[in-house]
């Protein structure tokens, strides 16, 4: 790792990651007033290419999150995509990887207001493999924590401060000996996993919570709804009760990090026959081959990094603060 280039995007420049630091007085550090995205890059040995998955959709969501949080950027979605592609190219990974863009408040001041508080964009990349290690299927609990409400911290925005909710739910699940948790909305309906959306399979139908149950509107969730339609499977986006989970034929999480992760137990009740189900596996295989550029139907979702020419505007940017 130490010999690998590690370049970040910070204050409008490509700089060594070690130089991309904010002050302890930074507003977003103190109040959680940043928003972020998580994007995967899939390495294809066969094609000698890194494919970035649904880059535009991630930045469209980031711009929605920014609007909610009074964050600004001079960049369009297309420009953010170009910055990302260039950053990945400069880090030249030949492995699966993860990109973490964020928009944050830059003021150094005490007081939480979002007004008169400038914003900036930053981004880094890390090599990234499986999110869940070694588990064939996940054993999960229903969390005693509730998902943040839209009128408290909107879950449809990927707000840094809201991940304290995620951290509490995830940590308690791990400490109780589970792999993950499912979090309910304040009304008792199923919301999502700690950092992933959820699908229930019942009688061949894929069911997922509606967007008004305080979920993050996942890019993977949307992709699965499309894949399911292409496979001729019925889907429903609706309110889901807790007890529907216990009697599901199959259950799986989905998300950029988690990818497709089958669940085999909820609150010590076995789901189906206790193994990853047939439909979950079908969705997983289709999704992964789409991500790796092996399915022509879904190439529309991928941005190849090495084939694309570097953008003129970004070519000349300095790569170290020493030369700024
Ligand atoms: C709270 C939460 N829900 C759902 C997801 C899944 O969203 P996506 O598929 O866009 O990664 C994530 C991951 O980003 C998340 O953090």
Image (tube, rainbow, N blue to C red):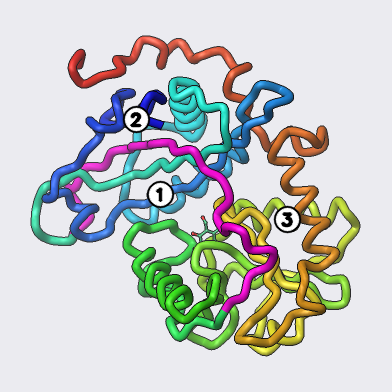
Which residue matches tag 1?
36
Check if residue 122 falls in the magenta segment.
yes
**x and y, in percent, of residue 140 in the image:** 58, 77
Q: How many marks?
A: 3
Q: Which residue is mark 2?
A: 9
- The disc label shown at residue 227, or none: none
Q: Is residue 147 magenta?
A: no
Q: Measure the C-alpha gap from mark 1 to mark 3.
A: 22 Å
* Residue visible at 9% across and 52% down in the picture: 109
Displayed quadrant of residue 74: top left
User: What stretch of residues is rendered in magenta?
Assistant: 113-140
**Residue 108: percent from left, percent from top:** 11, 47
Name the secondary structure under disc 2. strand
Q: Position of residue 53 (x, y in %)?
A: 62, 39
Q: CA distance from mark 1 to mark 2?
A: 14 Å
Relative height, residue 129 to residue 141 (above, below): above
């Amino acid at each position: 790792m130490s010999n690998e280039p590690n370049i970040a995007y910070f204050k409008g420049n490509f700089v060594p990651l070690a130089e991309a630091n904010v002050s302890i007085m930074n507003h977003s550090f103190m109040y959680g007033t940043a928003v972020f995205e998580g994007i995967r890059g899939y390495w294809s040995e066969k094609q000698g290419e890194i494919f970035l998955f649904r880059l535009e959709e991630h930045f469209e969501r980031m711009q929605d999150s920014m609007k909610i949080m009074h964050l600004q950027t001079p960049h369009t979605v297309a420009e953010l995509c170009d910055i990302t592609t260039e950053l990945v190219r400069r880090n030249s990974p030949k492995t699966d990887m993860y990109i973490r863009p964020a928009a944050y408040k830059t003021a150094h001041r005490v007081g939480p207001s979002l007004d008169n508080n400038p914003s900036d964009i930053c981004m880094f990349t890390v090599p990234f493999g499986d999110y869940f290690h070694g588990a064939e299927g996940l054993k999960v609990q229903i969390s005693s924590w509730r998902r943040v409400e839209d009128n408290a911290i909107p879950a449809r925005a990927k707000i840094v401060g809201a991940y304290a909710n995620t951290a509490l739910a995830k940590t308690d699940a791990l400490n109780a000996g589970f792999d993950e948790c499912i979090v309910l909305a304040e009304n008792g309906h199923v919301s999502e996993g700690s950092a992933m959306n959820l699908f229930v399979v019942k009688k061949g139908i894929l069911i997922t919570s509606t967007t008004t149950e305080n979920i993050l509107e996942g890019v993977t969730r949307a992709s699965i709804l499309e894949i399911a339609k292409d496979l001729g499977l019925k889907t429903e986006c609706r309110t889901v009760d807790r007890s529907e989970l216990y009697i599901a034929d199959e259950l799986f999480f989905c998300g950029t990090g988690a990818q497709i992760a089958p669940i085999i137990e909820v609150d010590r009740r076995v789901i189906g026959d206790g193994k990853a189900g047939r439909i979950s596996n079908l969705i997983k295989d289709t999704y992964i081959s789409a991500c790796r550029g092996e399915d022509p139907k879904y190439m529309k979702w991928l941005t190849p990094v090495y084939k694309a020419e570097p953008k003129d505007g970004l070519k000349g940017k300095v790569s170290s603060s020493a030369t700024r």
